[in-house]
Image (tube, rainbow, N blue to C red):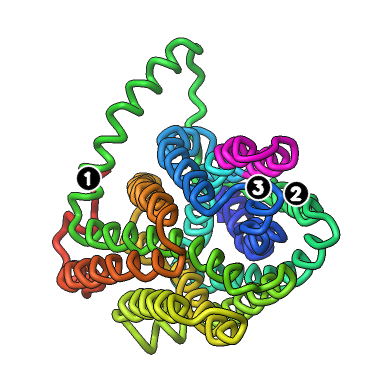
Amino acid sequence: MKKRDRNLHKIRKRNARIFPIYKMFSWDLLFFYPIQFLFYTITKGINTSQILIANSIFLLVKAISKIPAVHVSNKVGSAKSIVIGNCFMVLHTLFLIIFPGFVGVIIANIMMALGFAFKELGEDELLFDSVATKGGSGLYSKINYKGTSLYYLLDGMASLASGYFFLRDNYLPIYICLAFIVIATLISLGFGDIHPVDKKKVTYKKRLVARARQLRHQRWDYFKVVLGSSRLRSFIIFNTIYYSLFLLAGVYVKNIFLDLGVSEINYAIVFAITSIVSGLVIAFTKFIEKAFKNKTLTIMSMTYSVSCMILGIVTMFVSGKGIIAFSTILIIIMSIDRALWYAIKYKYLMHFTLHKDRNPITFVSETLGCIGAAITSIIGSIIVEFIPASKALTYVTIVFFILLVISILYMRTRFGLKPNKYKKEDIRLGI
């Protein structure tokens, strides 16, 4: 084995070894996410409609920042892209602490959008490249599921603690969240790139001109080529609809829970339970996919949307603490479906891909998903200004249920087929 091959082998092993630990600390905002709605409404003094507007700004900035993020990732590599993303996440948490009110949330969300744009682009690509050897696809799933499961289990314990900390001091969970992000950033420094990056030295002026031209042409070429594949196009349509639904429904559900009279500590306990159960289920993702085969996406999305509808309808007519236990069961089901989606979507998206295809595919999928979810959040913010969250959840979910059924029917003859059933352009993009 040549020296370069030995070095790459060591980098692959190190990436695969530390990735589950890194994901456990960094996948989302530990200690903050469980009390995010409480923090926004109680501490920052904003309402549900403003939260949805802040979410839409986050999604739009994330979509826009995908363009430079792809370019930077190609230039500096996936490993450094992850570090850059985590640095933006540190700034997000600091700005959330420093700046008051709705404006503070907007500024923090912009930093968070930049953070997720950079780090999400690098994380899955780095892991995929690190295990892209014989049997790599299966190893990718194994490592990714392990990291996801560990995150949910840790998040469950963090949710319990964050409710208690929030009662003591509203900002205490944010301080702890910041410490975990710093730990994740330090861990990410241990990652190494598998593929060489472009290190050609050019003048600053030439670099700016070349980058502007490249970005202008690349972004449209990416859309044209990726959406030209009927396999990817059908999956991205489904992804955009489903992602838009659970981001909007998640805000409505938290609003409904507070409307039911749930205390802050019980609120945290409920979402701790959902995280722990989700973490346990994620550990069996491989068996779930094997059992449901190519119906996994259908069962997952239908279960989620039906649970949303039932929760909305029931809470429209029944109020008070007597319905909390039933509502918790529905929220657990929804949380499991959402967790499964996050665990499997990148693997499905990257089937049959080469290294050069992955950034463009991720860029197109994430950009359209963010734009769709942003539009949905803006509409959702207007709706909840006029009707209660329970009614809003019911009406919105009915619309999305119909859209999901249509997208699933569209996918049936285009996605989840055997390799020999696809056209060449559906698999090899030629980017």
**Residue range of the region highlighted in magenta in the rendering:** 86-111
Q: Along the horizontal axis of the image, is 319 left or right of 359?
A: right
Who comes first in sequence, dot 2 or dot 3? 3
Q: Which residue is mark 2?
A: 178
Where disc 2 sits, the SS reads helix
- C-alpha separation, residue under disc 2 versus residue under disc 3: 22 Å
At 41% from the left and 41% from the top, the residue drawn is 63
Amino acid identity at mark 1: Val
Mark 3 nearby-residue class (10 Å; few <14, some 14–19, many ≥20): few
Who comes first in sequence, dot 1 or dot 2? 2
Label 3 or label 1, whichever lies nearer to me, is 3
Q: In x, y percent, where is residue 67?
A: 40, 35
Amino acid identity at mark 2: Leu
Amino acid identity at mark 3: Gly
Predominant SS of the magenta segment: helix
Q: In x, y percent, where is residue 327?
A: 53, 81
Who comes first in sequence, dot 3 or dot 1? 3
- C-alpha separation, residue under disc 1 versus residue under disc 2: 40 Å
Q: Which residue is mark 3?
A: 45
Q: Which residue is mark 1?
A: 225
Residue 132 shows up from this direction: yes
Residue 355 shows up from this direction: no
What quarter of the picture does the N terminus occupy?
Answer: bottom right
Question: Quadrant of residue 76 in the image?
Answer: top right
- In this rendering, the answer to whether 34 lies above or below 357 is below
